Image: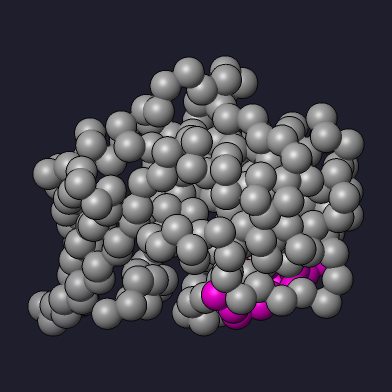
Amino acid sequence: MNPYTTLASVYDRLMDQAVYDKFCTRITGLLHRGGIEDGIVLELCCGTGSLTRRLSLAGYEMIGCDISPDMLDIAREKCADLPVPPVWICQSAEELDLYGTVRAAVCSMDSVNYFTDLRQLKQVFSRVSLFLEPKGMFLFDIRSRGMFESMNGLSSVQEEDDLFCTWQYGYDRKSGRGVHQVDIFSGKDGSIRRFTEWHEQRCYSVDTLKAALIAAGFSSCRVYEGLSTRPARTEDGRLLFVAKK
């Protein structure tokens, strides 16, 4: 099953929504430091629109792009009450095609790791750069190699009244590919249905990502430890990239 098909309907129940508050606070702070306090912002791989909504409420005109129509349906409903509802586009990131330019682009929750072919990743960066205004910013986070290695072999469980979800993680050091299996059990009145999704990601080194950004037309890139203000000194945990065109 394609990722984020069945998972789309329960995704918001499984995610800690406070994480999006932290992402929004950090991202808006960085955008303001870069002189981008308003205007059009693109969220690539926007999912169910949780961050899109928060950035809209922070004063940005949002475009949400995702390849999953199931996720976009939820995002559209979630953001329908906003004073200026986002524009939603169902596209793959490497085929991004906008009507005009944006002041900034955001891609969160390690979505960049889902581009498992380096040529595909370079195409994504090129498309973002193409539609980014001069001095525009591109912010994204990744799972580092250290994070993939620490998760290898781990399992986790989430449970609610009518929902039981298991996550099983694997990682192959040679290929740099990480795969996690998601099993969703849901139902009421004794009737239980099981759905399984496979998610594949790839880890990239900081040097590889910086080189791809420069090749796509970005002039500079800073890397931070997660959502902190500390510059990344190792390739462990979650890393936040802030690239400027």
Image: magenta residue range: 78-92
Identify which residue is drawn at 66% across, 77% down: 89
Identify which residue is drawn at 68% across, 65% down: 127
- Above or below residue 24? Residue 185 is below
Q: How is the image coloured?
A: one colour
Left or right: 100 as drawn, with respect to 18: right
- Above or below residue 239? Residue 186 is below
- The answer to which of 152 and 175 lies nearer the viewer is 175
* Corner quadrant of residue 152: top left
Residue 26 in view in this figure:
yes
Residue 75 in view in this figure:
no
Q: How far across and down, in percent of the image, does residue 175 sit?
A: 24, 52
Q: How far across and down, in percent of the image, does residue 161 sit?
A: 24, 61
Q: How far across and down, in percent of the image, does residue 157 sit?
A: 18, 50
- Please say whether residue 86 is one of the residues in the magenta stretch: yes
Identify which residue is drawn at 12% across, 44% down: 153
Identify which residue is drawn at 30% across, 32% down: 146
Left or right: 134 as drawn, with respect to 76: right
Q: How many marks?
A: 0
